[in-house]
Amino acid sequence: MALLEIRRLTKQFQKGDEVITPLQDVNLEIERGDFVSLMGASGSGKSTLLNAIAGIDRPTAGEIVVNGTDITKLSRGRLADWRAANIGYIFQLHNLIPVLTAYENIELPLLLLPMSAAERQKRVEIALDAVSLRDRANHYPRQLSGGQEQRVGIARAIVANPAMIVGDEPTGDLDAETTEQILDLIQRLNAELGMTLLLVTHDPKVSALAPRQIRLEKGKLIEKGHEVTVVRAEFQERRA
């Protein structure tokens, strides 16, 4: 079984009298250790898909199975607990809490998990080392550069050792030099630590770094020029 299995995923929004459908019968599989980039025009539904995978938004129809769990069937309370343990989210604008230090921002996801203070400290220190920010642990976001803030965001995303990391334009607000540094770090997370990555980007150069590249066009996922339509037999059996 793939780490991520999306089957016939549809998401609709009501806008006045109009029904907007950014995702229509989307299918996708991502294996453990994959690095996948997702491109598409502005407003095409890339963030909608990412938020559905992360359990932030609920789809209108379809299944999202992550690490063996169909998250579309979880209650809101269980979904929050599941997300904390299984998904690391890298945001474009860092989303750090300004009154917390780098250490405290990174520790936040662990507070939702059954874990001792000693284990939390160990994990935060490992995450700080992974992004080369141990010497900035007690600094507040205002005392950090944009690149350092994003590295704190990445450390926060990986600290719980999640099943999957998703990134929504994680370099979109950075200058060229800092972008190179962040992309190098993201590649190392995949190559050296074997982390599974799904990265949304509008930049073809960034997308090209991923061994697997897909596009979202008119509500459909396109890979190598063809719509992703594979539906496994066991999924069909589950629906029967």
Image: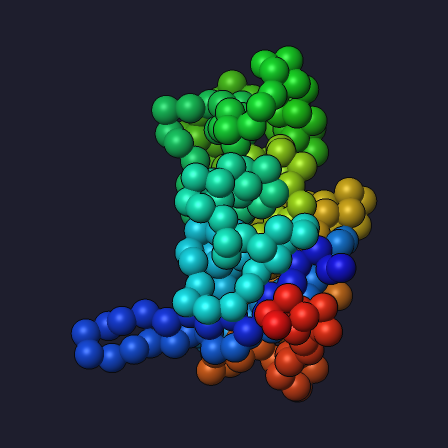
Q: Relative to the observer, which residue lies in front, 42 or 34?
A: 34
Left or right of 30? Residue 170 is left
Q: Is residue 153 visible?
A: no
Q: Is residue 239 visible?
A: yes
Q: Could you tell me residue 171's position as x and y percent?
A: 53, 54
Farthest residue toward the bottom? 225
Instruction: Report the number of numbered marks.
Output: 0
Q: Relative to the observer, which residue lies in front, 82 or 118?
A: 82
Q: Could you tell me residue 97's position as x and y percent?
A: 39, 31
Farthest residue toward the left? 16
Left or right of 192? Residue 161 is left
Q: Could you tell me residue 179's position as x and y percent?
A: 58, 52
Residue 114: quadrant of the picture:
top right
Above or below residue 69? Residue 227 is: below
Quadrant placement of the C terminus: bottom right
Q: Could you tell me residue 207's position as x and y percent?
A: 63, 67
Residue at point 67%, 52% (across, down): 68
Above or below residue 214? Residue 156 is: above
Residue 63: quadrant of the picture:
bottom right
| Colour scheme | rainbow
Left or right of 207? Residue 31 is right
Residue 154: quadrant of the picture:
top right
Residue at point 64%, 79% (across, down): 228
Residue at point 76%, 59% (across, down): 1
Farthest residue toward the right? 192
Residue at point 65%, 63% (across, down): 5
